[in-house]
Amino acid sequence: MNRNKNLPLTETVYYVLLALTEPAHGYAIMQKVEELSDGQVRLAAGTMYEAIENLLKKKLITLRESDRRI
């Protein structure tokens, strides 16, 4: 059986992916994660940005052109 190397997801990655079902910036992601988890998960900025960086490296998410810094 072939297993997906991206599984299992950590709780942080799971909620960040759920929060990104529509485009959002960092603070909005943090708020959405707290909302989705009924206040059980509160992400620190560093934790969230590390999760986003890992998701970008694995190409599980992409930046929209308007999100790229100049």
Image (cartoon, rainbow, N blue to C red):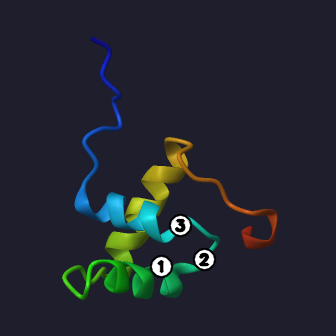
Quarter of the image containing the C terminus?
bottom right
- x, y (%) of residue 13? 35, 59
Look at label 2 and name its amino acid.
Answer: Ala
Which of the marked residues, 1 or 2, is nearer the chain's N terminus? 2
Q: Return the mark for residue 20.
A: 3
**Element class at badge 3:** loop
Tell me the crowding category of disc 2: few under 14, some 14 to 19, or many 20 or more residues within 10 angstroms, Cα based.
few
At x 28%, y 49%, the residue is 9
- x, y (%) of residue 8? 25, 42
- x, y (%) of residue 64? 74, 63
Q: Return the mark for residue 24.
A: 2
Look at label 3 and name its amino acid.
Answer: Leu
Question: Front-most of 65 and 29?
Answer: 29
User: Residues under labels 3 and 2: Cα distance?
Assistant: 6 Å
Question: Quadrant of residue 5 in the image?
Answer: top left
Tell me the crowding category of disc 1: few under 14, some 14 to 19, or many 20 or more residues within 10 angstroms, Cα based.
many
Cβ–Cβ under 8 Å for marks 1 and 2: yes
Answer with left or right where residue 34 lies relative to residue 30: left
Q: What residue is pinned by disc 1?
A: 29
Q: Return the mark for residue 46.
A: none
At x 41%, y 66%, the residue is 16
Question: Front-most of 26 and 24?
Answer: 24
User: Furthest-top residue in view?
Assistant: 1
Up/down of 41 relative to 59, above or below: below
